[in-house]
Amino acid sequence: YDGSSNYSSGINGGARTTRIPVGVTPPSNIAQSKPTNFNVSAGNTLINLTWDNPNNTDFSGVKIVRRTDYSPISPTNGTLVYKGANTSYTNTGLTNGTTYFYTIFAYDKNNNFSHIDSTVKAVATPYEGTPLPNAYEVTPPSTSFTEPNTATQGNIASMNASSSSGQIILTWVNPFNDISWKGTKIIRKTGSYPVSPTDGKIVYNGTNSAYTDTGVSIGTTYYYAAFAYNDWRNYSDGTVSGAKISKTAQ
């Protein structure tokens, strides 16, 4: 504006900006770099997989997906056999004579995945005795196809509660053997058990296996349910025995 308080319009392209609040990092949608040197070798009912992780600063891990008809074309298009940040894995319990097609995907903290090309695919056939030739793969769907993952997450187990000094201490066993498990939400209500991850107050969300609830009133009975979830936010039942418990605060 000038000395007579006449203002510019402020609507031209050079006068408008999108402001990000201080301390807030906008989410990235940039694809993660691909893993390299992806190799497989077959043995008796197993296949050994090795690779090199990308050295991006936002790299979080890799997912290896498997099929028996064609190379997976998305991180959900097949059986998830490995998730983590290591550089080798042995896929055991396989059927000798069956050809397995693998694709490896790197991902970052925003779940941006690496792209697909021939360098992130591998194929092998487990055998006993004489090595076997690999079967031919069928033509996969378009690479723009993404198969949604709707598999229900496995439940937590052995949920227990104790109370003293105006707090309730909860412990449980997470489904660590489920490689797609991402975390567990503990939901609290009064009067009845929560029946979904949104039916009550979230008192805990994470990967620990214990939590102390201090926001309770002595003499009140609280009902807790634990809902485990995976990368696709598919939740466990949470209403089964071992995943819920009630306790009166003392």
Image: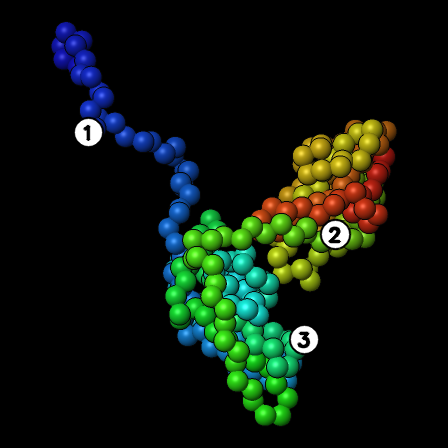
Can residue 206 be seen? no
Residue 243 in the image, given as x and y percentages of width and height? 78, 47
Q: Residue at x 41, y 74 (%)?
A: 37
Q: Residue at x 56, y 80 (%)?
A: 125
**Cα distance in 3D space between marks 2 and 1:** 54 Å
Q: Helix, strand or loop at disc 2?
A: loop
Q: Residue at x 60, y 77 (%)?
A: 98
Residue 81 in the image, given as x and y percentages of width and height? 59, 66
Quadrant in which residue 22 is drawn: top left
Residue density around tag 1, few if under 14, some if 14–19, many if 20 or more, within 10 Å = few
Q: Earlier in the sequence, mark 1 or mark 3?
A: 1
Between 94 and 173, the one nearer to me in the picture:
94
* Horizontal side of residue 172 vs 137, given as left or right: right
What residue sits right under mark 2 in the picture?
Answer: 156
Q: Earlier in the sequence, mark 2 or mark 1?
A: 1
Residue density around tag 2, few if under 14, some if 14–19, many if 20 or more, within 10 Å = many
Between 145 and 243, the one nearer to me in the picture:
145
Circle 1 or circle 3, nearest the eye: 3
What residue sits right under mark 1 in the picture?
Answer: 14
Name which residue type carries label 1.
Gly
Between 172 and 127, the one nearer to me in the picture:
127
* Horizontal side of residue 191 vs 175, given as left or right: right
What residue sits right under mark 3 in the picture?
Answer: 93
Q: Residue at x 77, y 49 (%)?
A: 171
Q: How many marks?
A: 3
